[in-house]
Image (spheres, rainbow, N blue to C red):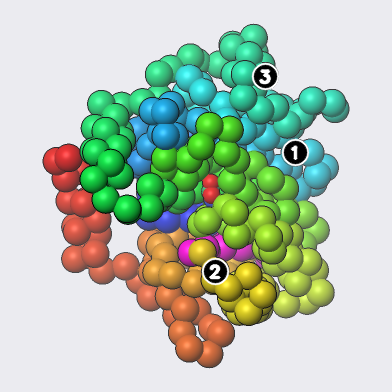
Amino acid sequence: MWGIIATWRMAHEGVINAKELLENEGTCGDAVEASIKYVEDYPFYKSVGYGGLPNERGIVEMDAAFMDGNTFKIGAVASIVDVANPISVARKLSNEKFNSFRVGQGATEYAMLAGFERKNMLTNRAKKIWQKRLEEIAKTNLSPYDGHDTVGVVSLDKHQGMAVGTSSSGLFMKKTGRVGDSPLSGSGFYVDSQIGGATATGLGEDLMKGCLAYEIVRLMGEGKTPQEACDQAVYSFTHLLKERYGKAGAFSLVAMNKKGEWGVATNVEFTFSVATANEKPAIYLANPDDNQKTIIEPITKEWLEAYEKRIKAPI
Ligand code: GLY
């Protein structure tokens, strides 16, 4: 059996490429890295890698993590700048016994010394969106914060290995040094090859209050299916947050277990991409219903066309 599940429509091409890899004895780690790199390199995705929206000073600060579910090795970077593929840096860091989570200048320095590609990650398009937002903020009381669509990928390979990875440019207009859930083990991602893995996208400040990726893996370890685990973790925590904190930000999680079964839960409309040995790569739309369950339906052609137009619309 093999499988891969990833957050958002943006991950779909990466999932298709990873399918070839996994079918041909490729490892889950390679599948996770390759699929996330595809998203990081694509200039029209404005919440990950090249083309990602910057912080309030116009700098693209990125977070990423990689975890190997066989060994529990974790590597992560936060607030890394000028590096083409933060996921690859995170993966390399996962082999370090010490200093495996680097932030800011330390992360960028590590990447440069290790020979990773240096790249100015601010595209003209992202710069224009940033400038426009600065003007809007000056004129109105609009909240400056927006967009935190992490790419998160869980993969299972034919050798029963599992891995998970995340990459994000974080919250648009964030303060310098703000870090979201994406590089945080348990919040943005978690995987245990003997159980399964999960990864998150959404408002990091709220996701880290619930450690939802770990919670989903824990629930799968107790015997829940990925869908039952996702529903229970996401809807009960959304409820708890509203009750105790007053509100819950938007968030969504995807999970896969060691058998290649998958699940998704979300408190907003959410797309994801999945492929397994038994299922062709496909994009789905997920929505919460009123009974703590997730409604999942295939994406329509109209939705995809509107999406394509939206991400490439003139600024
Ligand atoms: N989930 C990404 C972030 O909040 O930065």
Q: Is residue 273 above or below residue 101?
A: below
Image x and y of residue 312, in percent: 20, 43
Image x and y of residue 298, in percent: 35, 71
Camera-nearest label, 3 or 2: 2
Instruction: Name the dominant secondary structure of the magenta segment.
Output: strand
Q: Quadrant of the C terminus?
A: top left
The residue located at (30%, 44%) in the rendering is: 137
Q: Give the range drawn in magenta.
A: 250-259
- Dot 3 amino acid type: Gly
Answer with the quarter of the image where residue 132 lies. Answer: top left
Sequence order check, earlier mark of 2 and 1: 1
Viewer-proximal residue among 143 and 148: 143
Q: Is residue 284 above or below residue 199?
A: below
The residue located at (75%, 72%) in the rendering is: 219
Label 2–label 1 contact, CB within 8 A: no
- Dot 1 amino acid type: Ile
Which residue is under mark 1?
74
Label 3–label 2 contact, CB within 8 A: no
The residue located at (59%, 46%) in the rendering is: 180
The answer to whether residue 254 is magenta is yes
Kindly state the secondary structure of the residue where label 2 is placed: loop
Distance Cα–Cα, label 1 vs label 3: 17 Å
Q: Is residue 248 above or below residue 103?
A: below
Kindly state the secondary structure of the residue where label 1 is placed: strand
Which residue is under mark 3?
106
The answer to whether residue 313 is magenta is no
Viewer-proximal residue among 175 and 8: 175
Residue 119 can be seen in this image: yes
In the drawing, does residue 298 fall left or right of residue 253?
A: left
Labelled disc at residue 248 = 2
